[in-house]
Image: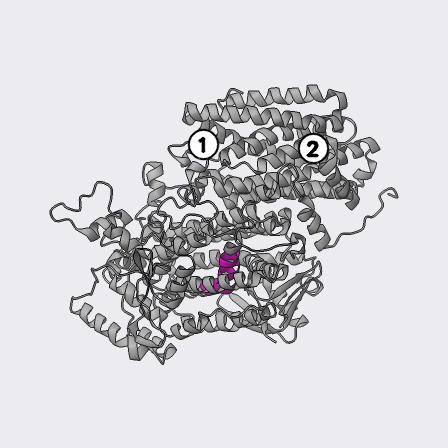
């Protein structure tokens, strides 16, 4: 299975998001680089709203991700609760 | 209140569907073919636009909200950077030349993308792609403007950025990016989507932005870093649009496969040729390097692109044929390009130089199989000659490839000591190419590529002198006349970095900033 | 050593880009609107003709019959570039969001009398299709118009129309349900009241001249529809019948029209002021499309004001003519 990835700006907003992603995706590997963080994961990667909300103590709309998103790869499935990146092969 | 019966809560997908395709209707007072006149001539068959899967589901209210937040952050940083003379905190003044290349070469393309997506959004007969394309159109004018606004501050203190729009339409090396986008926008709407939405945005944009932006961060350029990352946050939407378009065309009809494959092959090559400028920037122009071009290609193309093409294999899509040659070229690309600009440094709107000893050692380490063997000796020779007062400037004009418009600087894929030339006869003329791939692109659509506005041809035809110039006059200086036509200031915008006004000013200003006098 | 770069006073080599300075007549500090607008569009040495329109260059001023010596004579009085545009709309959407919330949480929709509610649904929800048409047409103007000073506001206007279509969809969902959206679509497709307007919109889709399209969509249709529906019917007629909640839900449209007409008027004034030929052409187009729009809107107005539609529409036409006179046109 190939890797998908998500790259985010490294700042106060994304600290909790990155923490939530690593919590929900134990197979993900985090690579910090200047001013950004790239998260690789084999096959698929899921960002969950509830996990982020638990960490930041307020409600979070997954579309807020757009503010700090740098790049990604894979097909996207977006619902109110989850954003999933995946490859089919 | 009991009258207020709670309503069924619509899911994001249902809500978005009402907000986009629900708005659309089948026209009956005018025929659909008249409303969308360009939807069929490329031969792409679409049976059901409703099968389109929306990649991201942003409604306009959310769009305004999040984009405004990004803009607020970005302009706060641009303002602070300008107020604090942030330009003096970059590693050294050579760095600023990457910014010049970016503003003259890339920002005008962002604007073209804005108009191109307005056109394609207008012409595609499906509501889903229309909304996604128009959102991309407005994003792209954002990118053009945030780049102009960020780099406006550099223009106030450094040379070569002062007339970027004028230069983009005229200067010889800028016809490479310009013709790339002109090629895409003059193609049909589906080909444009493959060219820009898929090949450029999805497959190649990471190679442009991530190295450039990380490079900016590494070299202390907060303002370029910020607009770069801020622009990239829109790219995630654009990339998913590009991928969705490919899947959609392939799922709609098996007859679309060969057309789409040919476009992918063509635009992977066209795009990579344009990225030659980025390769050179990464390996030679950033005073503090982040990664080599070769490494970036391996991470962002070979690894990522590999995953993508593996995924698309189920539709019958194969890796573009040109990738094999690009893989061979990754050892040579940046060195050959920089050598060319060093040669033609009198006709470029940025400064060139020979790398210092440390930088050459870095290149040896990153390119163990090619740098010492083929490129270091030449750079050392030029460096030594320059030290003796013989800085080499090439005064002849190069032959250009009819398709990518890059001078014939590339070598044979399997022989780095031999320049690669290809040619073909069409009607009464002979046409020249840098590679098999550019030649194949020409041969498929000769009527298009014979139109190319080739800067060298245009100079020889006398079309690149200021109005009223008399080339037969005593003492006519063609180079001076061409630079005047380009609005390039001789001795300020061009020539070697060593001894340039940029270098002197930067040192003096930083000296004032770091001393107590 | 810590540098305090702020304390360094250095003299800039230049204040703005040369192409901006040429337009300002001197090298002086320029606004972000100016730097983000002037000459942003390529204007020379295009490489290939569009395969989809080989008669023209990629950007070609002859796509319209209007002639300008300088297409950067146009100026958006709002001086919108992307940043100021999105900030302005974000603020408005904040208000709109608060209004929708207010109506929803207080159950104000349920308190509307049945007649006002039915009229609102019948009148407003099909208009989301008209706004969707406005989105398409402004995308055309942006794509095929000439010069960023003219084309830039068109993409903002296109996205505004999409936003309005989406707000109207929310009105339908708030006052009714998904069925209401379907019913409105049926009315739009087959209902007698809407066929004139749908024909108008579809006819505008095939206009090739971007400035004629600007006249048909932004000047004539929107110039009559917005004051008629949002100012006269919603804010006056429905509000007096207890429909203030509806006015809250359409506040965005009312304010939007007030703001954007300044750009529309300024554009007309500049184009008409350029030459007698331009003025004559714009007057001819405006008269033609105004008359078509007025008659297409008549049955729509009847939904809300019944027999008074004639008078109400005639008043709108009167006000429209006065507005155009201020822009230097006799229609």
Give the labeled residue for mark 1.
Answer: C65
Residue range (magenta): B193-208
Q: Is residue C176 visible?
A: yes
Identify whether B423 is placed above or below B227: below
Image mark 2: chain: C
Residue at 61%, 22% (x, y): give it.
C317
Where is residue B488 drawn, in percent x and y?
27, 50
Q: Is residue B76 visible?
A: no
Q: Report the chain holding disc 1.
A: C
Residues at marks 1 and 2, CA–CA distance in whole angstroms? 30 Å
The stretch drawn in magenta includes residue B206:
yes
Depicted B349 relative to depicted B27: above or below = below
Tag 1 and tag 2, C-beta contact below 8 Å: no
Q: Nearer the viewer, residue B282 or B448?
A: B448
Mark seen at residue B330: none
* Disc number for residue C195: 2
- Residue B22 in picture, x, y percent from top left: 70, 46
Q: Position of residue B156 (x, y in %)?
A: 34, 49
The secondary structure making up most of the magenta span is: helix
């Amino acid at each position: 299975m190939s890797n998908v990835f998500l790259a985010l700006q490294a700042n106060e907003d994304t600290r909790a998001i990155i923490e939530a992603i690593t919590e929900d995706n134990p197979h993900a590997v985090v690579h910090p680089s200047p001013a950004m963080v790239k998260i690789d994961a084999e096959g698929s990667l899921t960002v969950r709203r509830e996990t982020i909300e638990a960490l930041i103590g307020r409600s979070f709309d997954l579309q807020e991700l757009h503010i700090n998103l740098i790049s990604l790869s894979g097909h996207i499935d977006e619902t109110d609760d989850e954003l999933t990146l995946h490859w089919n092969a | 209140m009991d009258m207020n019966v709670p309503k069924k809560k619509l899911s994001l997908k249902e809500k978005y569907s009402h907000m986009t395709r629900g708005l659309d209707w089948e026209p009956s007072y005018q025929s659909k073919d008249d409303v969308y006149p360009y939807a069929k001539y490329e031969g792409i068959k679409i049976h059901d636009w409703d099968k389109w899967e929306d990649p991201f589901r942003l409604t306009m209210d959310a769009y305004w909200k999040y984009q405004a937040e990004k803009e607020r952050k970005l302009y706060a940083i641009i303002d602070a950077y300008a107020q604090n003379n942030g330009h003096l905190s970059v590693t050294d003044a050579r760095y600023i030349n990457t910014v010049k290349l970016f503003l003259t070469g890339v920002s005008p393309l962002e604007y073209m993308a804005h108009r191109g997506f307005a056109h394609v959004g207008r012409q595609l007969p499906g509501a889903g792609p229309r909304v996604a394309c128009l959102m991309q159109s407005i994003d792209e004018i954002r990118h053009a403007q945030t780049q102009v606004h960020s780099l406006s501050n550099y223009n106030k203190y450094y040379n070569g950025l002062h007339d970027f729009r004028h230069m983009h339409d005229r200067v010889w090396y800028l016809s490479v990016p310009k013709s790339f986008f002109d090629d895409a926008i003059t193609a049909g709407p589906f080909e444009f989507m493959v060219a820009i939405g898929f090949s450029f945005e999805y497959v190649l944009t990471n190679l442009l932005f991530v190295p450039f932006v990380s490079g900016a961060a590494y070299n202390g350029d907060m303002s370029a870093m910020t607009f770069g990352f801020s622009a990239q946050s829109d790219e995630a939407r654009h990339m998913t649009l590009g991928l969705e378009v490919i899947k959609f065309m392939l799922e709609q009809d098996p007859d679309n496969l060969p057309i789409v494959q040919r476009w992918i092959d063509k635009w992977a090559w066209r795009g990579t040729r344009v990225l030659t400028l980025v390769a050179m920037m990464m390996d030679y122009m950033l005073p503090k390097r982040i990664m080599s071009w070769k490494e970036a290609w391996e991470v962002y193309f070979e690894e990522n692109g590999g995953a993508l093409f593996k995924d698309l294999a189920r539709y019958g899509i194969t890796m573009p044929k040109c990738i094999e040659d690009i893989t061979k070229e990754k050892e040579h690309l940046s060195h050959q390009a920089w050598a060319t600009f060093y040669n033609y440094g009198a006709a470029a709107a940025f400064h060139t130089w020979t790398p210092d000893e440390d930088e050459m050692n870095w290149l040896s380490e990153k390119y163990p199989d090619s740098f010492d063997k083929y490129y270091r000796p030449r750079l050392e020779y030029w460096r030594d000659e320059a030290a003796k007062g013989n800085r080499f400037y090439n005064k002849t004009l190069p032959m250009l490839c009819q398709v990518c418009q890059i001078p014939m600087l590339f070598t044979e894929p399997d022989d780095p000591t031999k320049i690669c030339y290809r040619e073909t006869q069409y009607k009464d003329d002979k046409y020249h190419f840098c590679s098999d791939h550019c030649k194949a692109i020409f041969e498929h659509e000769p009527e298009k590529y014979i139109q190319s506005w080739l800067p060298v041809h245009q100079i020889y035809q006398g079309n690149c002198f200021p109005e009223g110039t008399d080339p037969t006059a005593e003492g006519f200086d063609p180079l001076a006349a061409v630079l005047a036509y380009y609005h390039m200031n001789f001795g300020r915008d061009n020539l070697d970095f060593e001894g340039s006004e940029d270098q002197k000013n930067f040192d003096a200003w930083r000296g004032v900033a770091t001393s107590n006098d | 050593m810590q540098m305090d770069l702020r304390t360094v006073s250095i003299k800039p080599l230049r204040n703005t880009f040369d192409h901006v300075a040429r337009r300002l007549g001197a090298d002086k500090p320029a606004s972000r609107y100016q730097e983000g607008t002037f000459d942003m569009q390529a204007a020379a040495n295009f490489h290939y003709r569009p395969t989809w329109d080989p008669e023209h260059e990629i950007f070609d001023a002859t796509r319209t019959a209007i002639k300008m010596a300088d297409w950067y004579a146009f100026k958006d009085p709002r001086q919108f570039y992307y940043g100021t545009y999105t900030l302005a709309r974000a603020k408005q959407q904040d208000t709109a969001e608060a209004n929708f919330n207010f109506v929803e949480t207080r159950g104000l929709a349920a308190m509307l009398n049945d007649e006002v509610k039915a009229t609102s649904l019948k009148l407003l929800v099909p208009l989301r299709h008209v706004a969707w048409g406005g989105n398409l047409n402004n995308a055309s103007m942006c794509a095929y118009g000439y010069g960023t000073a003219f084309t830039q506001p068109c993409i903002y206007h296109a996205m505004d129309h999409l936003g309005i279509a989406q707000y109207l969809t929310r009105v339908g969902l708030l006052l009714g349900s998904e069925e209401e959206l379907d019913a409105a679509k049926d009315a739009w497709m087959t209902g007698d009241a809407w066929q004139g307007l749908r024909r108008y919109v579809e006819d505008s889709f095939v206009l090739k001249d971007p400035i004629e399209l600007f006249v048909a969509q932004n000047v004539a249709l929107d110039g009559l529809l917005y004051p008629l529906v949002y100012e006269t019917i919603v804010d006056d007629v429905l509000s007096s019948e207890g429909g203030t909640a509806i006015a809250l839900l359409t506040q965005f449209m009312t304010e939007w029209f007030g703001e954007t007409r300044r750009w529309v008027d300024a554009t007309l004034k500049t184009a008409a002021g350029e030459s007698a030929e331009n003025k004559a052409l714009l007057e001819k187009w405006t008269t033609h499309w105004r008359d078509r729009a007025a008659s297409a809107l008549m049955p729509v107005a009847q939904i809300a004001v019944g027999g008074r539609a004639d008078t109400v529409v005639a008043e709108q036409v009167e006000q429209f003519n006065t507005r155009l006179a201020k822009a230097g046109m006799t229609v």
